[in-house]
Image: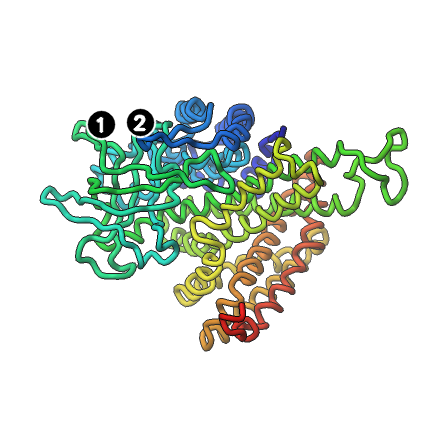
């Protein structure tokens, strides 16, 4: 059976030493999370993930969710009790303002906790993740009456939340959306249509589910400009807050999926269901994008989380599995064979996964702090600068972490050899569960197009110029520091590759858009590698300082892992640049019927 140990020491190192969490104490909520409170939160989240959620991961995979003849859904054994513990522990309201029953703590802590929960049980964590996303959308775009009516019960775990975008005929292209809304005399709307792939669309964990639904008001314009957002409760809510009649919302089917079996992915039918407009008419995408950005950050963390738990189990197996002898001579002559950890190729596999995990975790914390600044700072310029970097890097985080997270689960499975293919060992579930993260909340090809087509040119390139300046300044400031040179010199070279690629796309993508499309995925991964290089530079600098201050020699493992990244992974920026500069010519040459 697989195991999981939350990386609490690495998280503390990032929060305390790399990013200096306490320097943000001028922001709302940060002073409520001093070091001792952070430690308690991290420790309790780790305990809950390891002791409650991880043992249910295989249970959820084997049992899945079951739909009754009446459309009700039963979640796997133990999920209801675990969700109750999650709610009672206050985890659902960690970042929600106290006015609505939450604790108002920084988003950064929620993302750290989220990694632990996802590594332990990805399917289970999605129920709470979508609820928190729905709360975020209502906080920004909901009326005060809607906030008071829905959020406190969602935070308390009595009600859950979902997001309803996709329809059978349209996914990314929401302009094709057909779900309609008809306005009523009392100001409400009647919602009719079918949504698919709705995570947690129906379940037995909560007494109500608050669906956020995209629909087109009768008579609205075609395309995305005519889309509005509605809040549609599963059970209608009376003016006094009590539950009333069942709404016209039902689960038509549970999707049979490759992975995340413990999460009920539903076909949802809306039959004249009562709904209420969230925000302005025909501005639904603006409101839903709040939830989607929350979700994309969370999905990026899913890639990291599955990579981390797969790595832990592969490393444990490699230390124990006896197979062959070390190339340099027997490492364990008293045993019939050496553990496979002695083999360079096994070490390469494990260390590259580890180098990814630690850089990805740092990127997650870095961007979460940007999110906190963007939402909590009283300085308009600070908010704008943080929001620029956040908007630019969200597609990179989502695409790069999930692409590589999936690849790493496959690599970790390979370490197990044939035993990795056997279900009871758990490795194949990590592979299956991780695969979806590359697809939902905007498939990764769409993330790459969003980066190149929207985020780079936005505000005349202000965000990418700021990113180049931040990383470039770090390289310049540390280039003359002897112990930093082996790390910042390669970073500077790769930053140059990214800048060259950016210029090439600006010059060649505008005149021939297919060039931008052909290079988008490589550009996203090139951007990700440079960001990881920057994260490793920050971590190396902090580790060296702590070692000088007498910290545990265990931190020297950071320096070794950093070397693996700059020697074996960062050089891939040159290959990405070459593919970008190859353009779209060859890719577009064949007629469609030749494929």
Q: Nearer the viewer, residue 14 or 241?
A: 241
Q: On the image, which quarter does residue 550 sit in?
A: top right
Which circle's residue, 1 or 2, is located before the other in the chain? 2
Instruction: Answer few, some or many: residues within 10 Å of disc 2's Cα (few below 14, many 20 plus, some between 14 and 19).
Output: some
- Residue 199 locus on image (x, y percent): 40, 40
Q: Is residue 301 left or right of residue 407?
A: left
Q: Is residue 221 left or right of residue 420?
A: left
Q: Is residue 577 left or right of residue 104?
A: right
Residue marked by disc 1: 243
Residue marked by disc 2: 207
Residue located 46% across and 60% down the image: 451
Q: On the image, which quarter does residue 80 sit in?
A: top left
The quarter of the rendered structure image containing the N terminus is: top right
63 lies above or below 277 = above
Residue 177 visible to an observer of this rendering: yes
Q: Nearer the viewer, residue 574 or 464?
A: 574
SS class of the residue under badge 2?
A: loop
- Residue 394 locus on image (x, y percent): 46, 52
- Residue 89 locus on image (x, y percent): 43, 24
> How far is disc 1 from disc 2 in space, using C-alphas?
9 Å
Q: Residue furthest bottom?
A: 511
Instruction: Answer few, some or many: residues within 10 Å of disc 1's Cα (few below 14, many 20 plus, some between 14 and 19).
Output: some
- Residue 411 locus on image (x, y percent): 66, 45
Question: Are the residues at dot 1 and dot 2 in contact (C-beta closer than 8 Å)?
Answer: yes
365 lies above or below 169 = above
């Amino acid at each position: 059976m697989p195991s999981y140990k939350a990386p609490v020491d690495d998280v503390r190192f990032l929060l305390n030493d790399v990013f200096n969490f306490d320097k943000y104490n001028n922001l709302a909520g940060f002073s409520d999370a001093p070091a001792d409170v952070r430690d308690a939160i991290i420790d309790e989240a780790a305990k809950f993930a390891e002791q409650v959620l991880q043992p249910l991961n295989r249970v959820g995979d084997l049992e899945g969710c079951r739909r009754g003849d009446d459309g009700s859904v039963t979640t796997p054994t133990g999920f209801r009790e675990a969700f109750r513990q999650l709610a009672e522990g206050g985890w659902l309201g960690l970042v929600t303002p106290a006015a609505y029953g939450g604790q108002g703590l920084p988003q950064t802590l929620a993302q750290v906790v989220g990694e632990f929960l996802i590594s332990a049980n990805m399917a289970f964590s999605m129920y709470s993740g979508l609820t928190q996303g729905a709360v975020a959308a209502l906080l920004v775009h909901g009326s005060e009456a809607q906030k008071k009516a829905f959020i406190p019960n969602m935070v308390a775990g009595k009600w859950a939340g979902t997001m309803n975008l996709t329809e059978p005929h349209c996914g990314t292209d929401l302009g094709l959306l057909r779900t309609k809304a008809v306005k009523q005399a009392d100001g409400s709307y009647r919602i009719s249509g079918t949504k698919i792939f709705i995570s947690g669309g129906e379940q037995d964990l909560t007494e109500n589910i608050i669906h956020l639904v995209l629909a087109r008001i009768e008579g609205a314009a075609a395309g995305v400009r005519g889309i509005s957002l509605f809040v549609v409760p599963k059970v209608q809510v009376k003016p006094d807050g009590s539950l009333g009649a069942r709404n016209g919302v039902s689960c038509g089917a549970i999707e049979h999926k490759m992975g995340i079996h413990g999460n009920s992915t539903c076909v949802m039918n809306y039959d004249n269901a009562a709904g209420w407009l969230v925000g302005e008419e025909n501005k639904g995408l603006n409101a839903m994008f709040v939830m989607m950005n929350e979700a994309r950050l969370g999905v990026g963390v899913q890639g990291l989380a599955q990579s981390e738990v797969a790595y832990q189990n592969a490393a444990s197996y490699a230390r124990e599995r006896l197979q062959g002898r070390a190339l340099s001579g027997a490492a364990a002559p008293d045993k019939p064979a050496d553990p496979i950890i002695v083999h360079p190729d096994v070490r390469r596999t494990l260390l590259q996964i580890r180098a990814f995990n630690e850089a990805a975790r740092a990127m997650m914390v870095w961007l979460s702090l940007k999110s906190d600044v963007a939402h909590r700072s009283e300085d308009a310029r600070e908010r704008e600068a943080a929001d620029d970097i956040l908007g630019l890097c969200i597609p990179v985080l989502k695409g790069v972490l999930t692409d590589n997270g999936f690849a790493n689960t496959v690599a970790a499975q390979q370490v197990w050899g044939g035993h990795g293919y056997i279900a009871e060992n758990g490795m194949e579930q990590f592979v299956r569960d991780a695969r979806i993260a590359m697809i939902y909340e905007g498939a990764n090809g769409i993330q790459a197009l969003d980066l190149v087509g929207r985020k780079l040119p936005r505000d005349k390139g202000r965000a990418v110029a700021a990113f180049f300046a931040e990383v470039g300044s770090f390289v310049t400031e540390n280039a003359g520091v002897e112990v930093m040179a082996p790390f910042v010199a390669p970073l500077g070279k790769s930053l140059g590759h990214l800048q060259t690629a950016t210029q090439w796309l600006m010059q060649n993508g505008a005149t021939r858009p297919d060039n931008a499309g052909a290079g988008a995925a490589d550009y996203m991964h090139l951007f990700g590698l440079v960001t990881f290089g920057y994260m490793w530079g920050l971590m190396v600098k902090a580790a060296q300082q702590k070692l000088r201050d007498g910290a545990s020699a265990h931190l020297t493992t950071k320096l070794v892992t950093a070397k693996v990244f700059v020697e074996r992974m960062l050089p891939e920026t040159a290959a990405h640049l070459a593919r970008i500069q190859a353009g779209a010519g060859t890719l577009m040459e064949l007629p469609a019927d030749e494929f």
